């Protein structure tokens, strides 16, 4: 990581969660590229892609979408052969 940036990964994660309205989220991936933290988060069956300026801490982009059903934990999926009402 380039130490010239004032925003570290933990701060970027906290800013991303605040912007998304989350108390906490699982960090799926993070990378520092072109002066921005690129974060992929998941929480409450949703995924979030967030870009945080590594110098100012400004959240420059946030996108979210549902986690595909195929990726739900087994305990949340319908039993085989049973159809949802």
Image (spheres, grey):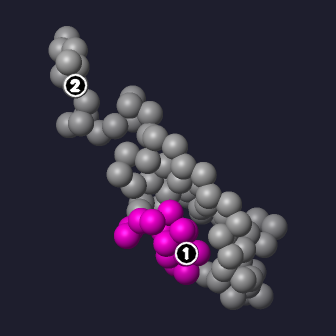
Secondary structure, mark 1, is helix
Give left or right: position of 36 versus 83.
right
Residue 48 included in the magenta stretch of the image: no
Q: Residue furthest right?
A: 34
Residue in view at x 76 percent, y 65 percent = 33
Which of the image's four quarters has the C terminus?
top left
Q: Residue furthest top?
A: 81
Q: Give the CA distance from mark 1 to mark 2.
A: 35 Å
Q: Main secondary structure of the magenta part?
A: helix
Q: Which residue is mark 1?
A: 15
Q: For the point 44% across and 54% down, which residue is it? A: 42
Q: Height in image: 50 above or below 17?
A: above
- Say if residue 1 shows up in the picture: no
Disc 2 is placed on an element classified as loop
Residue 16's place in the image compared with 63, above or below, is below
Looking at the figure, which quarter contains the N terminus?
bottom right
Disc 2 target residue? 78
Name which quarter of the figure residue 53 lies in.
bottom right
**Precedes in sequence: disc 1 or disc 2:** 1
Give the residues drawn in magenta, as a range.
10-24
Which x, y percent locates residue 26? 42, 60
* Residue 58, x across and y down, in percent: 68, 76
Residue 24 image point, x, y percent: 39, 68
Residue at left offset 43%, top offset 47% = 46
Q: How many labels sit on residues?
A: 2
- The quarter holding residue 80 reads top left
**Classed neighbour count for the residue bearing mark 1: other residues with Cα under 10 Å, few (<14), some (14–19), many (≥20):** many
The answer, for residue 78, to whether it is visible in the render is yes
């Amino acid at each position: 990581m380039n130490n010239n940036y004032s925003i570290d990964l933990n701060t970027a994660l906290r800013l991303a969660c605040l912007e998304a309205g989350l108390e906490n989220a699982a960090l799926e991936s993070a990378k520092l590229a072109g002066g921005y933290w690129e974060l992929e988060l998941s929480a409450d069956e949703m995924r979030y892609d967030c870009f945080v300026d590594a110098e100012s801490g400004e959240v420059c982009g946030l996108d979210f979408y549902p986690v595909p059903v195929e990726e739900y934990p087994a305990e949340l999926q319908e039993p085989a052969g049973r159809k949802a009402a």
